[in-house]
Image: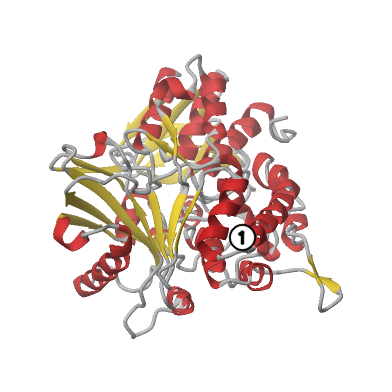
Amino acid sequence: MARIVVIGAGMGAMAAAARLAVAGHRVTVYERTDTYGGAVRRFERDGFAFDTGPGLLTLPAVYRDLFVKTGKEPLEDCVELVQVDPSSRHVFADGTEVSVPNASRAGVVAALDEALGASAGERWGEFLVRAREAWDRTRRPLLEEPLWPNWRVLADKEPYPGVPHKRLLRTRRASTLAEVGDWELRDERLTALLESHALAHGLDPRTAPASAAVLPYMEHAFGTWYVRGGMRELARAVYERCVRRRVEFVFGAEVARVLEKDGRAAGVELTDGTVAEADHVVADVDPVRLRALTEHPLDEDGDVRADLVQPLPGRFTLLLALRGGRGAGAAHRTVVHPPAPESELDFLVSPGGDEPPLPTVTVLRPDDPALKPDEEHESVVVSAVVSSEVGWEDEGTVRRYTDLLLEAARPAIPGLAERLLWHEVRTPEHVEDETGARFGAVPAPALAAGRGRFLHPANTTRLPGLYRVGGWSHPGGGLPHAGMSGALVAGLIVEGPEFRGSQ
């Protein structure tokens, strides 16, 4: 039985802790804040409740596997999973609207044809076939196995297939997601639908590799799910599973440094001077912060994303308490697309002195009695991906973005101005306070191609006994990816360096 210290109580950390405890190890989690879940949190006021982190779940099989492997109670005995249908409603700048059915290719094709015109659905359906090919080529090495030592195999070759071009009499291969939209979808609205999947993760579709096509494919193939009571219920269930497996949690305990002995990680020292010895240390923290916890180099020179020091996009969120019921037929998720998407992307990459343009907003309106005081009210979450460099400590900036999001969200919420009782604002600074991630950045899932710029550091490090877990390590950000990283780290510790992923 090994002693294992886990830094942070995010979803990836807890997934690893539960699996390690079941394997017979003694696991202690040190979390600097007063609760578990990382970014998966809840805000409550006046009978209203809101998810402040992820609002939906893809690939629920990741957490089903976690619960099967760590106890007798399956996931569905611990939380209620609801498949969201339609998966999303999209409101485009020209006023066109389309509701995208959940996990139904025929339904999606028919809906797009009806809303956007004949052949729109066919082009999207053909795109999904190519996206599946990229998924099949990368799924195992990118998501289910530890990052290969020769990770450049994933970095140099674009897995998204080339498309024959009749006029050019040759096959051309898109290198970015924007090129996929321009060359293959040939409709600004279809392109906006495609690119919104990348933007939701803070990715610029103009630079994101074509392999980012796997992001909409994941939703299409595996469905979009909601946890009744809010996504915080999933965090609660994972935490309780850890506790039942005798994982110890210490809250309000910030790690100051990783201890080393005989050339390997040997425990941690807390900011109050407490020392916790361990045989293995698992860190669910921002890579820059992890680097500050040890003087030992963690990656080979020039290794994948070893220098994640530039500010990455964050998320600006409004929590809206509304009078009046949700209304029949309201979509759980609506994406409202702006009139000037290029201006939005330019401002996201390089915010200047001009007023920010209208952003793409995601509006979540769960049909969940647990989130509101009664049927005569509604709780709504409106969010947009934003630059982390605009000065969120300035009240004027916060007011400007609040007004922008409210304006952008009006097409998704009838009578918004008259119904609004109050709102709460959450900036990237709130995310940084809760998760420790610099600039409040939200990590994106790992993607192949792009010369490795969209991969994440391996779960192992050059310091033996120190492992990385969670969204800032392989295989990247997002709820399912966090669960996968926990499984990978547990496998590496239990089975050793020869571990190659689940079979």
| Residue 321 x %, y % | 19, 50
> Image quadrant of residue 113?
bottom right
**Tag 1's secondary structure?**
loop
Residue 203 visible somewhere in the drawing: no
Q: Residue at x 81, y 78 (%)?
A: 167
306 left or right, relative to 275: right
| Residue 47 x %, y % | 15, 39
157 left or right, relative to 11: right
Residue at the far right in the pictured view: 169
Residue 150, placed above or below residue 346? above
The residue lying toward the viewer, choosing from 153 and 406, is 406
> Image quadrant of residue 334?
bottom left
Residue 495 visible somewhere in the drawing: yes
Circle 1 is placed at which residue position? 454
Q: In which quadrant of the rendered image does the N terminus lie?
A: top right
Instruction: Kindly identify the amino acid type of the residue bearing the numbered disc 1.
Output: Phe
Q: Residue at x 75, y 57 (%)?
A: 159
